[in-house]
Amino acid sequence: MSPFDNPSSSVSRLEASLPCDWQNIRAAKSLAEAKRTELRNALTGLDSEDTSIVVSGSLARDEFTKGSDIDWSLLVDGSADPKHHDLRRKIGELIRPLMTKPPGREGTFAATVFSHDLVHEIGGENDTNQNTTRRLLLLLESRAVGRDDAYRRVTRHILSRYLQEDRGLWRSSRYHVPRFLQNDFARYWRTITVDFAYKIRDRAGQGWAIRNMKLRMSRKLIYVSGLLACFCCHFKFAGDPQVFTDPGRNKEVAEYLQELFDMTSLEIVAHVLVDMPHLAGAARKIFDSYDGFLGIIADEDKRKRLEELKEEEAEKDGVYQEVREYSHVFMSGLLEFFFDIESGMNELTKNYGVF
Amino acid sequence: MMRAHRLQAVELSALRENELVPLLNDLDSLDLHQFSYVSIHAPSEFSAAQEPTIRDLLKGQLRRGWPIVMHPDTIHDFELWRDFGPLLAIENMDKRKPTGRTAHQLASIFEKLPNASLCFDIGHARQVDPTMTEAYLILRRFGGRLRQVHVSEVNTRSKHDVLSYSSILAFQEVADLIPLPVPLILETPLTESQMQIEIEKVGSALPVEQNVAVA
């Protein structure tokens, strides 16, 4: 059975309704599921009610390809224990044979992450680039492999902070978009774009093309899904605005967002588009181009080409130009979607996405 | 000690399997007249082979009209307990237990025991999810089944402790979903000198009628 035969998959429903054939998206999802099963089997018994082994990146987004790395961390939400250090090393030892390349250099992954900074340090000087990244990736592209008790507690805590401290959300107003959360998504997205320039400089241009394409596609997609999840709060409760004014019901908003963030970024986008048939053209652009992008990333030769390509060679490089074209179509689809008048997306985008 | 505080609810606990028979043997001789609400806590662990005997022993007490509090993870054969009806109170579990912790997990248990009631352990619910979203979901979904509430702070080692300021604030978040006069059963081991302070803390966290029901 194809993974997209699952009737709960919005991507599958959208694919069938257009109709389209997104074979690279399907293949990446299938590979991600297989790799997560492999990890789960290898790591059985290492997690607990206070520790979750969390994967991020393409493996969590269901966009895994043969060249993908495994971004993982040990999330601790419980008493400090010196043995957590040994546990992290053990997990690393067991994951290493399953990896095709080492995790990123920034130290964000393959690390022990404690819940306190993620929950308490939102904004301010102690909210480092690394802390922001870990916190927002936990919401936008992560999954627990194995026991998810700690993972669920922490993500709920983080959402609870963003929502409870959002003064505007709980007042009667025209729009009900969690602006505190949305602002942090926007900040994270802009941080990634600035860090792109930093990393290119720091690494003397090495890996420029692949980073550029990931920025235009997969990194942009997770921002899009975060922004969309915030907009979904407005659409979801448009007929039931009391949820925002009745203090006894505000946990329903947190629960709804948690359900959304349990989906992958592509699923969140499809979840909205599948109910907006007038945006079929935009949906095709977004998903066709993303499918094409994943096809290139999954092609070992093309991926290698992008990894090694020098900036000055890009204009004449066929692979780069192919994926660049996908990124333009992707952007065009997103603009049609987010500035659509009929659905009201344009008003939300103007009010929350611009200023 | 309980008389001095004019408590009206009590739970008689046989958490260990070997405590059950002595407790049941003593029931007729216990002076429980001050209590308007009495429940029995069934053993928290027994084998499948012991289950029919324990079920028969507890079924013999149903004539008293006292709810029997059960941990859902102890049940091997749900059919055996179905005819207890609403006098079987299923308790939501702490984070160590494999099931019965969340509203979603409780739903599958209540499917098997459609008439059972709920013993809501607010300390367990907070330990599982300190944002109290899970507590909210349990009460919103199963509030109609609510028979009694277990109150305590459940610490990181899953032990019952006195209420902290944080737990009081957390409990207040769902207090409106606990209707009066649902009996509140205080599970924290207390000395006599701690009792009044703890009762006052419970009163600041949850709705407690005058003269009611903390034990």
Image (cartoon, rainbow, N blue to C red):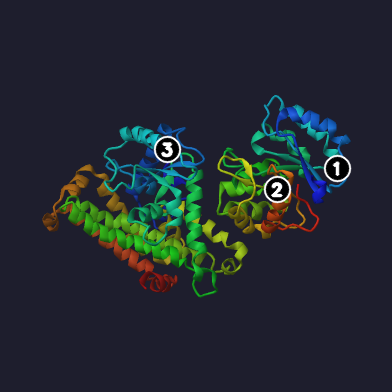
Real-space CA distance between mark 2 and mark 1, rounded to the nearest whole angstrom: 23 Å
Q: Position of residue A75 (x, y in %)?
A: 43, 44
- Most extreme residue toward the front is B193
Q: Can residue B204 be seen in this view?
A: yes
B163 relative to A349 in the view: left or right: right
Q: Position of residue A210 (x, y in %)?
A: 22, 51
What amino acid type should be assigned to the residue bearing mark 1? Answer: Leu
Residue drawn 38% across the image and 73% down it: A350
What amino acid type should be assigned to the residue bearing mark 2? Answer: Gln
In depth, the one of A294 and A164 nearer the eye is A164
Real-space CA distance between mark 2 and mark 3, rounded to the nearest whole angstrom: 36 Å
User: Could you say whether the residue bearing mark 1 is in a helix, strand or loop?
Assistant: loop
Would you name the residue on which mark 2 appears? B194
Q: Position of residue A138 (x, y in %)?
A: 41, 51
A207 relative to A277 in the view: left or right: left
User: Could you say whether the residue bearing mark 3 is in a helix, strand or loop?
Assistant: helix
In depth, the one of A9 and B121 nearer the eye is B121
Q: In which quarter of the image is the N terminus of chain A?
A: top left
The reply to whether label 2 and label 1 mark residues of one chain is: yes
Q: Could you classify mark 1 by the number of other residues whose Cα lies within 10 Å: few (under 14), some (14-19), or many (20 or more)?
A: some
Image mark 3: chain: A
Q: Could you classify mark 2 by the number of other residues whose Cα lies within 10 Å: few (under 14), some (14-19), or many (20 or more)?
A: few
User: Could you say whether the residue bearing mark 2 is in a helix, strand or loop?
Assistant: helix
Would you name the residue on which mark 3 appears? A84
Between discs 2 and 1, the one toward the N terminus: 1
A162 relative to B30 in the view: left or right: left
Would you name the residue on which mark 1 appears? B32
